[in-house]
Image (cartoon, grey):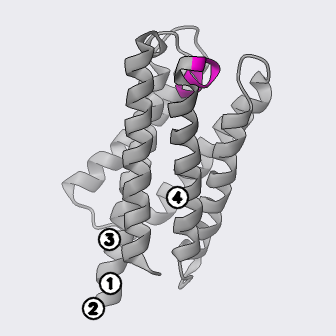
């Protein structure tokens, strides 16, 4: 695995995604309370560009990261394939607006969250169990649960839960890659 390049790709993906989502919130803060999730921002002219940049850059960088993984065990293989699948599903989420393709959009979104959750479980066995990683795992589980609960309700904090989930997942993947790199160097 070219861990250094994969780590750089993941860091860039996190920064771009968060920056573009933050820009969407600044442009249209009402999205935080309408409980439509991150996808709310893909339905408006004033937020469509940062929304598309967030999703396309995350998709591209996840695909790139998956190409950098050299498979040494089943977890590496699962992560490589999983990242490619998440990359494709992010595009699926992006091109299926919930306001008229709701079931397709929710299917892509739910499948993406579940796959990311399974990827976190698979990689967490290799993580150094320090306070940061334990908190990140707790954040993934809690924010994922809240995102699911808010999906079923008409009001709530779905955008916040989804962003926390995504960033926590990506930070855990970053931790996995760093640990993998340390073990490879030894």
Residue 161 position, x and y percent, is 44, 28
Residues at discs 2 and 1 in contact (Cβ within 8 Å): yes
When the figure is inspected, residue 185 is found, relative to residue 15, above or below; the finding is below
Q: Residue furthest bottom?
A: 186
Query: Is 44 inside the magenta-drawn segment?
Result: yes
User: Pointer 2: what residue?
Assistant: 186
Residue 139 position, x and y percent, is 35, 40
What separation in Å lies between label 2 and label 1 (alpha carbons)? 5 Å
Labels 4 and 2: the sequence-earlier one: 4
Magenta residues (range): 37-45
* Mark in front: 4 vs 3: 4
* Mark in front: 4 vs 1: 4
Camera-side residue: 61 or 103? Answer: 61
User: Pointer 4: what residue?
Assistant: 61
* Mark in front: 4 vs 2: 4
Residue 67 position, x and y percent, is 58, 73
Residues at discs 4 and 3 in contact (Cβ within 8 Å): no
């Amino acid at each position: 695995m070219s861990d250094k390049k994969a780590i750089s790709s993941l860091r860039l993906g996190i920064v771009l995604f968060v920056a573009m989502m933050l820009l969407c919130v600044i442009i249209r803060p009402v999205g935080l309370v309408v409980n439509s999730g991150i996808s709310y921002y893909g339905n408006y002219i004033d937020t469509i560009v940062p929304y598309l940049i967030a999703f396309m850059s995350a998709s591209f960088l996840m695909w790139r990261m998956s190409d950098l993984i050299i498979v040494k065990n089943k977890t590496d293989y699962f992560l490589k394939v999983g990242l490619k699948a998440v990359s494709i599903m992010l595009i699926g989420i992006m091109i299926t607006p919930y306001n008229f393709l709701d079931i397709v959009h929710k299917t892509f979104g739910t499948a993406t969250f579940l796959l990311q959750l399974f990827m976190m479980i698979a990689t967490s066995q290799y993580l150094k169990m320090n306070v940061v990683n334990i908190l990140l795992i707790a954040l993934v589980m809690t924010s994922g649960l809240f995102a699911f609960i808010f999906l079923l309700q008409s009001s709530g904090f779905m955008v916040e839960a989804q962003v926390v989930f995504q960033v926590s997942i990506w930070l855990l993947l970053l931790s996995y890659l760093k640990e993998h790199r340390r073990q490879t160097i030894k």
